[in-house]
Image (cartoon, rainbow, N blue to C red):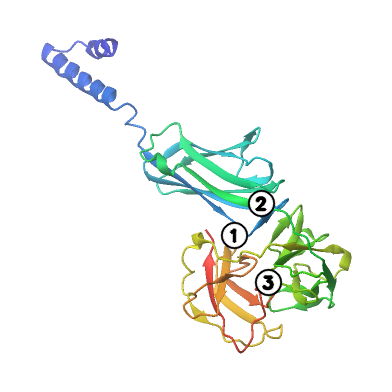
């Protein structure tokens, strides 16, 4: 400090001016000592939240979850790092944006987040064992002070299950046809319970299609699956629709279908869906036929590439809503969504019981 003041005195100035300059430099230096770094950095309140898919999780599922990092301000945050350790017994499928990994811990360097900036991190992991997992992550900046550490970490718990015993078979019951209304090649299959006990719910895993199964609810061990969310009693069958994102008809056979008995599917909408999309809240859909007999067509304004969730109820106040599967990624700024019954919804829409729908833009 003395050296810097001496350097300011070196010009040949009158004694009075020297005293003024010396006093100014001393006061400025005192400010820097009292508020170190205040000229270049402000405190920034970093927060992280994790949103997980609402579906039940079974062994070898590709379990997706999304992390949102927000800078609540007031200052910009630099060198923002998200630390995420994979749950025990799970395998990383993919993640974005770019990250580094040490053992089972992922580090996402988000760089600088200005005031109110939000960054999105997407992870898919595959649990290898039927146990309860806790998925957690944290965010911090070594370059900025954070006045609220309570929102610097987030977590959720998931119970991973095994498929249950059951005697289920599947078979094709229609040829492929093109549905111009939604732009998919479609085909009906039949799920049958040939056992002596009821099955609470079921999954049909489809092999050999990869990303072609447009109405897949998820992925298990690399293969897409659909969900039948109702009880299937012994000797009973149910028809389910497969929708293919294929440009032409193709060869498909019964050997590509594998039915698995599961616990009763949890189709309760998650609490973090937020509010309905603008101008598309609660309303009753006229139950008129579209391309599929007895189906219902919903049309709503959308944002291309954004993901939407549809819920429905037979109650005008949307009491006890049920989740429709799967979530829908909008192809354009206007979206057509069909309720054709299973596997999208637990039963076929009918003219005798009105259904009410609500669409949410996913977080």
Q: Quadrant of residue 9?
A: top left
Residue 307 visible? The answer is: yes
- Say what secondary structure mark 1 lies in: loop
Sequence-wise, the earlier of marks 3 and 2 is 2
Residues packed near mark 2 inside 10 Å, few (<14), some (14 to 19) or many (20 plus): some
Of tags 2 and 1, the one toward the viewer is 2
Q: Position of residue 207 (x, y in %)?
A: 82, 60
Residue 230: image tag? 3
Residue 160: image tag? 2
Residue that mark 1 sits on:
54
Q: Are marks 3 and 1 in contact (CB under 8 Å)?
A: no
The quadrant of the rendering that contains the N terminus is top left
Gap in angstroms between the C-alphas marked 3 and 1? 17 Å
Q: Nearer the viewer, residue 360 or 90?
A: 90
Q: Residue at x 57, y 62 (%)?
A: 306
Q: Position of residue 318 (x, y in %)?
A: 49, 75
Q: Residue at x 70, y 74 (%)?
A: 342
Q: Are marks 3 and 2 in contact (CB under 8 Å)?
A: no
Q: Position of residue 61 (x, y in %)?
A: 71, 53
Q: Nearer the viewer, residue 187 or 355?
A: 355
Q: Is residue 138 above or below residue 348?
A: above
Q: Is residue 118 above or below residue 210?
A: above
Of tags 3 and 1, the one toward the viewer is 3
Residue 214 visible? The answer is: no
Gap in angstroms between the C-alphas marked 2 and 1? 13 Å
Q: Position of residue 346 (x, y in %)?
A: 66, 74
Q: Nearer the viewer, residue 340 or 210?
A: 340
- Say what secondary structure mark 3 lies in: loop
Sequence-wise, the earlier of marks 3 and 1 is 1
Furthest toward the left, the residue is 16
């Amino acid at each position: 400090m003395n050296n810097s003041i001496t350097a300011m005195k070196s010009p040949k100035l009158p004694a009075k001016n020297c005293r003024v300059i010396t006093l100014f430099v001393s006061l400025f230096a005192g400010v820097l000592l009292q508020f170190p770094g205040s000229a270049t950095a402000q405190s920034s309140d970093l927060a992280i939240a994790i949103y997980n898919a609402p579906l039940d999780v079974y062994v070898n599922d590709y379990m997706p979850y999304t992390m949102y990092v927000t800078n609540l301000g007031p200052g910009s945050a630099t060198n923002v790092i998200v630390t995420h350790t994979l749950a025990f017994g799970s395998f990383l499928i993919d993640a974005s944006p770019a990250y580094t990994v040490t053992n089972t811990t992922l580090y996402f360097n988000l760089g600088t987040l200005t005031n109110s900036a939000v960054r999105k991190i997407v992870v898919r992991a595959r649990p290898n064992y039927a146990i309860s997992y806790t998925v957690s992550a944290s965010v911090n900046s070594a370059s900025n002070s954070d006045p609220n550490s309570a929102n610097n970490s987030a977590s959720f718990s998931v119970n991973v299950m095994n498929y249950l015993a059951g005697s289920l078979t599947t078979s094709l019951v229609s040829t492929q046809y093109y549905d111009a209304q939604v732009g998919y090649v479609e085909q009906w299959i039949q799920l049958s319970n040939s056992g002596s006990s009821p099955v609470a719910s079921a999954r049909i895993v489809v092999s050999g299609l990869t990303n072609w199964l447009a109405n897949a609810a998820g992925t298990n061990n690399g293969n897409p699956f659909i969900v039948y969310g109702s009880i299937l009693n012994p000797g009973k069958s149910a028809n389910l629709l497969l929708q293919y994102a294929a440009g032409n008809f193709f060869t498909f056979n019964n050997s590509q279908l594998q039915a698995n008995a599961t616990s009763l599917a949890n189709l309760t909408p998650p609490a973090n869906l937020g509010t309905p999309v603008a101008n598309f809240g609660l309303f009753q859909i006229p139950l008129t036929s579209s391309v599929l007999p007895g189906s219902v067509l919903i049309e709503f304004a959308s944002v291309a590439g954004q993901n939407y969730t549809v819920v429905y109820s037979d109650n005008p106040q949307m009491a006890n809503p049920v989740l429709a599967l799967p979530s829908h990624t909008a192809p354009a700024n206007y979206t057509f969504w069909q309720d054709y019954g299973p596997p999208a919804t637990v039963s076929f829409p009918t003219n005798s019981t009105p259904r009410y729908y609500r669409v949410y833009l996913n977080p």
